[in-house]
Image (cartoon, grey):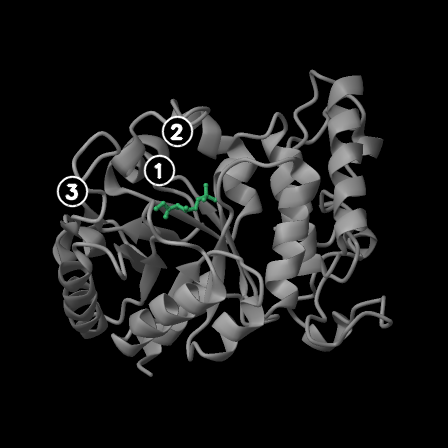
Amino acid sequence: MDWGLKNRISRIIKPQNNRALMLAVDHGYFLGPTEKLENPKKVIAPLLKHCDSLMLTRGVQRMAVPATTETPMVLRVSGGSSIIGEDLSQEDITVSIEDAIRLNASALAMSIFVGSKYEYQTIVNLGKLVSEAERYGIPVLAVTAVGKELGKDARYLSLACRVAAEQGAHIVKTYYCDNFEKVVQSCPVPIIVAGGKKIPERDALQLTYNAIKGGAVGVDMGRNIWQSENPVAMIRAVRYIVHGNANVEQAYQLYKKLVNEKKNNPKQNQNQPNKNNPKQNQNQPNKNNPKQNQNQPNKNNPKQNKTKNQSQPKKNNSNQNNPQNVQK
Ligand code: 5RP
């Protein structure tokens, strides 16, 4: 695999633990102003630092994301149909590779509609996109879109994921389902799971946990984060599972704790240092006394960055079960 391709993938799927937390905000490309995503700039701002990558369209990227961000962009390059049109599966590639490069995309995303009227067109487009993107070392995320008439069962999703991987997709996004392990086992590239429509927070955390346990590298979650009453608390709880190896109960407790903190101190933005009470800024590095920054990785001596909690599974041994350590 070429260096550039490897490097871009490693920005999306973290090599430390082979996990990924992608925040999806691309819904407007066929849904228009989706509920609670009417103003993408406002939605994205507080969440950006809590995700590993952001999945979006070029319109939203230019309009709503500061160009100074270090968060990698997964750029949706397919579209052409809307929710009120005739057939959602009639998609084409809508963004040139030149524009994707101008936007410094870390990956390109497009949907394939396996089993629907326009499957041929979308699958051929995927193959062509992979060929073009690979010329520039850019990975492609294939989204296995599910039409109204198609079920989200393991048989169908295995087929759709495998078709995507056979066309050369580097990562496949699909849905969680019963027997999800079967989908993962028959797909030769990493799978990332979509959140789907809004469900109660605890259920969305359960879905995240199940997906990871079933072999997904992570989630590409949208509505279950920004349609939550508490998006920052929710993304941090999801992150705690993806990167902190938390179980559902631990993540849900973190969610509730963050919600309560916000209720008790509504003026205090959960992400900002509290200038009036520096003692509350326990996650902030102490510039004056670096010795106190014991949760910060030691860039000069990586050997010193050993995790404290060794009773957790070895698979993901960074940041284990300490919600403060899973913050970016
Ligand atoms: C739509 C998409 C969305 O990004 C994807 O479905 C993830 O968002 P959500 O968690 O809201 O389902 O690709 O085609």
Q: Which residue is mark 2?
A: 40
For the residues labelled 1 and 2, the Cα–Cα distance comes to: 10 Å
Label 3: which residue? Answer: 80
In three-dimensional space, the C-alpha distance between marks 2 and 3, rounded to whole angstroms, equals: 20 Å
201 versus 89 height, above or below = above
Please tell me in which quadrant of the rendered image residue 317 appears: bottom right
Mark 2 Cα within 10 Å, few/some/many (few <14, many 20+)?
many
Mark 1 neighbour class, 10 Å CA radius: few under 14, some 14 to 19, many 20 or more = some
Which of the two residues, 102 or 187, is positioned nearer the viewer here?
187
The amino acid at mark 3 is Gly
Q: Nearer the viewer, residue 270 or 287?
A: 270
Q: Amino acid at mark 1?
A: His
**Residue in front for this viewpoint, 307 or 177:** 177
Contact, CB < 8 Å: mark 2 with mark 3?
no
- Residue linked to disc 1: 27
Q: Secondary structure at mark 2?
A: helix
> Alpha-carbon neighbours of circle 3 within 10 Å: few (<14), some, or many (≥20)?
some
